[in-house]
Amino acid sequence: MPAKYDALVIGTGQAGPALAHRLAATGWKTAVVERHKFGGTCVNTGCIPTKTLLASARAAYVARRAADYGVTIGGEVSLDMARVKARKDAISSKSSQGLERSLKTLEHATVYEGHARFIGPHTVVVGNQTLEAERIFINVGARAFVPDLPGLGDVPYLTNSRMMEVDFLPEHLIVIGGSYVGLEFGQMYRRFGSKVTIVEQGPRLISRDDEDVSAAVKEILEAEDIEIRLDAECLSAASRNGQVAVGLECLAGAPETVGSHLLLAVGRRPNTDDLGLDLAGVETNARGYITVDDQLRTSADGIWALGDCNGQGTFTHTSYNDFEIVAANLLDDDPRRVSDRILIYGLFIDPPLGRAGMTEAQVRASGKTALIAKRPMSRIARAIERGETQGFMKILVDADSKLILGAAVLGINGDEIVHSILDIMYAKVPYTVIQRAVHAHPTVTELIPTMLAELKPLE
């Protein structure tokens, strides 16, 4: 006989555990299924471990720059990669194990470890267990996409997950992919001491962002002696004397680059291809993402999809917000929607990029009458004092409503600063609210009111 539950949560990424706790707290008999590591991508191979590694890389970078600040450090700065990895593992494991413990001791909840597969609309098999539930919540996440490159099967390669096991310093790391994962790992390993080449098929890095942002990011990375190869069409891979040769067809530069290690960072794919979704009547799009409505309901009654697998946001914060939306609608009689969400994300190179709302290109394409303000970090006292003047801040405003449309903050603390702008956007109040606010000196944020006083028409 199948075990019957009020609710079944498949996957323990950012949305699943929080939802399981809410459901169990209502007294619902809840089942939780996890087939691998508790915590999903963020805890095990994403945010937490990579930002821990980035902290080690920044420590090395600052140590090498000590003389710029009048500080003398005896001897050459060196890295113990085994200790770097051990620190990362300790922090990541603590989060994963704590989450696992909280779920396994949760009242009204039962944890099943294994792969879940639908065999009917509300029936799932996990190993030799059959589970039934009125309501099922899919939170299975995504994994690295491996492109079909000629010769790739003949060479060893790394993904963001496999990078977590690296406890040595690659002599020359070739990164295929000029977006968030690739750029963060590229700068990280350059600061550790590897030679780094970043290869991007498109004409610029981070193509979802504005051209001035892309250009500034490229300048930041190249200033650290990272080689950037753009317009790299017809990519291929081959083994060459124990190393990896990546064939390129670029507008400029050599036709191939040879390195010791290859990292693929060309996107993600949802973990939906082995769930038996068709047997549950759950529809997916051409890329495998589960189709959901504005409240994250799938095409099948009583089944929801949260997190990366629904294609509505590939970030930890959007996944957690998915939990909040589902819980609000299901338990709190609060009709929250995905469409209420304002885009926000960070690129955690150093200095970081914080992005909110529309890009300048999107504003131009919308036909809105808009205003723009922009200020380089080289004109911000706090950045000068810190010796970190790379990047700029940019804000776009609707000229008619005076509402902020979007912002990009590339520079010192940009990943944190952008939230002061985001909060004004959520409040739906005119930009003058923050423009007239008095911010503390000396900070980077204090220049936001100054910028907004200098708005000009977007031409």
Image (spheres, grey):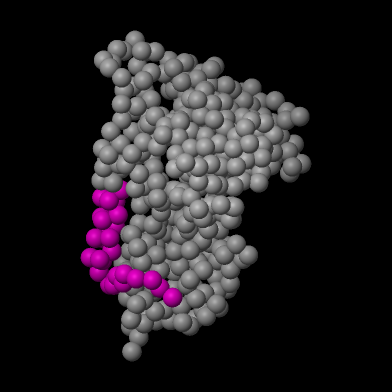
Q: In this view, does 334 lie above or below 342?
A: below
Q: Which residue lies furthest to the bottom in this view?
A: 1
Rendered-image quadrant of the C terminus: top right
In the picture, measured across the screen, residue 436 lies left or right of residue 39, that is right
Q: Residue at x 59, y 52 (%)?
A: 150
Splitting the image into 4 quarters, where does residue 215 fall?
top right
Q: In this view, does 95 lie above or below 245?
A: below
Q: Which residue is drawn at 48% across and 58% down?
A: 142
Decide whether residue 112 is among the magenta residues. Answer: yes
Give the magenta range. Answer: 92-117
Q: Where is residue 210 in the image (x, y as percent from the top left)?
A: 64, 36
Q: Which residue is drawn at 34% across and 77% down?
A: 127
Q: Is residue 311 above or below residue 414?
A: below
Q: Which residue is drawn at 31% across and 72% down?
A: 112
Splitting the image into 4 quarters, where does residue 398 fall?
top right
Decide whether residue 393 is among the magenta residues. Answer: no
Tally of numbered discs: 0
Splitting the image into 4 quarters, where does residue 433 fall?
top right
- Seen from the viewer's position, the closer of residues 26 and 99 is 99
Q: Can residue 359 be seen in this view?
A: no
Q: Position of residue 364 (x, y in %)?
A: 73, 38
Q: Which residue lies furthest to the top in this view?
A: 70
- Seen from the viewer's position, the closer of residues 360 and 309 is 309
Q: Can residue 373 be seen in this view?
A: yes
Q: In this view, does 372 lie above or below 442?
A: below
Q: Position of residue 293 (x, y in %)?
A: 58, 65
Rendered-image quadrant of the N terminus: bottom left
Q: Where is residue 388 in the image (x, y as percent from the top left)?
A: 46, 20
